[in-house]
């Protein structure tokens, strides 16, 4: 059962058994969350050149699909 608790500070807190079970199944969930936060910060601070170099296949795929749509139009 999911319950949502709202306090005066504007933060909604969710009490859920699934969240508790997930934290039990993943012993190092705190480390995983910290790794995800640091990866997100690194991507936000990335320059355009770095992102193009890192995601070369995604950029090429996007260009090909966009050009295909333009050609059909």
Image (cartoon, rainbow, N blue to C red):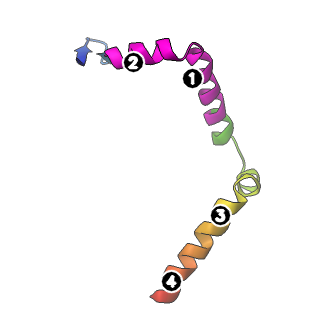
**Residue drawn where x is 50% and y is 16% of the image:** 25
Q: Residue furthest front?
A: 25
Q: Which mark is residue 59?
A: 3
Q: Which mark is residue 70?
A: 4
Secondary structure found at label 3: helix
Percent coordinates x, y for residue 2 in the rendering: 24, 19
Q: Which is nearer the N-term, disc 3 or disc 1?
A: 1
Q: Which is nearer the N-term, disc 4 or disc 1?
A: 1
As measured in the structure, the alpha-carbon distance from the residue carrying label 4 to the one carrying label 1 is 40 Å
Segment tinted magenta in the rendering: 16-40
In the rendered image, residue 31 lying in the magenta stretch gets the answer yes
Label 1: how many residues lie within 10 Å, few (<14), some (14-19) or many (20+)? Answer: few
**Residue drawn where x is 54% and y is 75% of the image:** 66
Secondary structure found at label 2: helix
Residue of label 2: 19
Pointer 2 with pointer 4, Cβ within 8 A = no
As measured in the structure, the alpha-carbon distance from the residue carrying label 3 to the one carrying label 1 is 28 Å
Residue 19: quarter of image? top left
Residue of label 1: 33
Q: Which is nearer the N-term, disc 2 or disc 3?
A: 2
As measured in the structure, the alpha-carbon distance from the residue carrying label 2 to the one carrying label 3 is 36 Å
Percent coordinates x, y for residue 37 in the rendering: 60, 28
As measured in the structure, the alpha-carbon distance from the residue carrying label 3 to the one carrying label 4 is 16 Å
């Amino acid at each position: 059962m999911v319950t949502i608790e709202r306090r005066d500070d504007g933060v909604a807190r969710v009490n859920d058994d699934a969240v508790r079970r997930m934290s039990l199944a993943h012993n190092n969930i705190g480390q995983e969350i910290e790794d995800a936060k640091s990866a997100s910060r690194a991507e936000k601070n990335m320059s355009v050149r770095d992102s193009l170099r890192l995601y070369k296949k995604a950029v090429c795929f996007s260009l090909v699909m966009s050009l295909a749509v333009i050609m059909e139009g």
